[in-house]
Image (tube, helix red, strand yellow):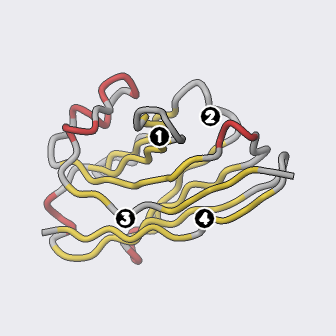
Amino acid sequence: QVQLVESGGGLVQPGGSLRLSCAASGFTSTYNGIGWFRQAPGKEREGISSITMRDGKIYYADSVKDRFLMTRDNAKNTVYLQMNDLKAEATAVYYCAAATDATPLLHIANMRVRSFDYWGQGTQVTVSS
């Protein structure tokens, strides 16, 4: 089993920044990578970024590319999502999830909810003035 805990969400003004954390515990060697998803009110959960553990390759959705940065700290079993220049449409619950199969990590279009095996509880991000 793998446990994931997100933190770092909150209220931020448009144009501001937040850094989300996803701390993993348990059998962390069993998954191939981590993805970040978000779910806005009334919308489906969408994948926005992923990282493969073996080689550290990172992928971004076009909607967040150049403004969001995903990093990892292997010693802490933690991945981060630095979110800059936030816009109101970024308001959502943000989740991290772990996948044992590498396929859903290698392209944003492959990031389907059912392809990820472990999920955190989510953290709310609200972008508002």
Disc number lying in front (3 or 1)? 3
Task: Return the residue at label 2.
Answer: 64
Q: Earlier in the sequence, mark 4 or mark 1?
A: 4
- Which circle's residue, 4 or 2, is located before the other in the chain? 4
Q: Mark 2 and 1 residues: CB-CB less than 8 Å, in contact? A: yes
Which label sits on residue 121? 3
Position above or below: 114 against 77: above
CA gap, disc 3 and disc 1: 17 Å
Q: Which quarter of the rendering shows the N terminus?
A: bottom left
Q: Secondary structure at mark 3?
A: loop
Label number found at residue 49: 1
Quote the CA–CA distance across marks 2 and 1. 8 Å
Give the crowd class for mark 1: few <14, some 14-19, many >=20 residues within 10 Å. many
Residue density around tag 2, few if under 14, some if 14–19, many if 20 or more, within 10 Å: some
**What numbered label is drawn on residue 99?**
none
At label 2, the amino acid type is: Val
Q: Whole-Å distance between the Cαs marked 3 and 4?
A: 12 Å
Q: Which residue is mark 4?
A: 9
Q: Residue 78 location in percent, x, y? A: 42, 68
Q: Tell me where residue 111 appears, x and y as whole percent.
A: 32, 32
Q: Secondary structure at mark 2?
A: loop
Q: Secondary structure at mark 4?
A: loop
Q: Amino acid at mark 3?
A: Gln
Q: Nearer the viewer, residue 52 or 65?
A: 65
Reading the chain from its start, which is encountered first: label 3 or label 1?
1
* Amino acid of disc 4: Gly
Q: Are marks 3 and 1 in contact (CB under 8 Å)?
A: no
